[in-house]
Image (cartoon, rainbow, N blue to C red):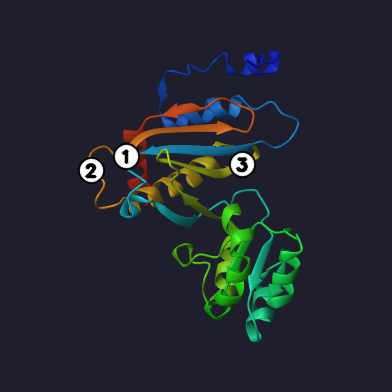
Amino acid sequence: MAKLGKKYKEKISGVDLAKTYQLTEGLDLALKCTYANFDESVDIAIRLGVDPRHADQNVRSSVVLPNGTGKTERVLVFAKGDKVQEALDAGADYAGGDEFVEKIQGGWLEFEKTIATPDMMATVGKIGRVLGPRGLMPNAKLGTVTFEVANVVQQIKAGKVDFKVDKAGVVHALVGKASFGPDKLRENILTFMDKIMQVKPSSSKGVYLKGISISSTMGPGVKLDPLEMSTLAKQAA
């Protein structure tokens, strides 16, 4: 078992890992646990009362955070004709067709997000085995298969976050950087929570929000009160 460092022990000393906190106090504690010499990310983990084995409970969507994520995403758009220039004008890092398929087949993967126009999906399908396992395949449910490429590029650059429940029924997402401060992080978190509530499957019975925690890159998970989070998200909507 790895030994805990002195700095880590000092920072987490004020956190009761078994306690459930209100958002304001919990967020404050999570930020106090940052100690790295870089701007730590702040993540949220939500355990949902769903069974991902059932297709109608496989929670998956996206949301644009009002204050962005603090992370610059390199965007590749698969398109042709006028849509190539439209994507580049909107801020895409790369845009094109077969030439990028060939580059990816050769091992190039210098991007974090992809978008494709519907007429390019047959071409993109050639590299599905490369993009799919890495979560890089354009997906209509996430709005990344569209002719509205400029709009989606701008959303991604502005802080669009894609999320999907994992096999354990947990959703993980980046909600900002420690340098954002509590107010901007709170706004991002509640926007994310509102989206989680919106996509609740109608077939999900019982308690939907079973557990929520936030953490910085180097810090511990700080548990939040699901009932309060649900109420605050509705108020912020």
Q: Quadrant of the N terminus?
A: top right
- The mark found on residue 19 in the picture is none
Badge 2 crowding class, 10 Å Cα cut-off, few under 14, some 14 to 19, many 20 or more, is few
- Which tag, 1 or 2, sits closer to the chain's start? 1
Q: Residue at x 23, y 39 (%)?
A: 206
Label 3 amino acid?
Phe
Between discs 3 and 1, the one toward the N terminus:
1
Give the Cα distance between marks 1 and 2: 8 Å
- Which numbered disc, 3 or 1, marks the residue closer to the eye? 1
Q: Is residue 164 left or right of residue 99?
A: left
Q: Residue furthest bottom?
A: 81
Among numbered discs 3 and 2, the one appearing first in the sequence: 3
Where disc 3 sits, the SS reads helix
Residue hosting label 3: 180
Up-down: is 221 above or below 107?
Answer: above
Q: How many marks?
A: 3
For disc 1, the neighbor class at 10 Å (few under 14, some 14 to 19, many from 20) is: some
- Crowdedness of circle 3 by 10 Å Cα count: few (<14), some, many (20+)? some
- Give the numbered dot on residue 205: 2
Residue positioned 48% across, 19% down in the render: 17
Expressed as whole percent of the image width and height from the top left, the position of residue 12 reads: 58, 18
Seen at 42% across and 34% down, the residue is 212
Task: Return the residue at label 1.
Answer: 49
**Label 3 – label 1 distance at C-alpha:** 30 Å
Proximity of marks 3 and 1: CB atoms separated by less than 8 Å: no
Amino acid type for the residue under numbered disc 1: Gly
**Tags 1 and 2 touching, CB below 8 Å:** yes
Q: Is residue 100 visible?
A: yes
Given contact means CB atoms under 8 Å apart, are the residues at marks 3 and 2 in contact?
Answer: no
Compared to residue 168, the image places residue 131 above or below, namely: below
> Residue 147 location, x and y as percent?
53, 78
Q: Is residue 109 above or below residue 148?
A: above
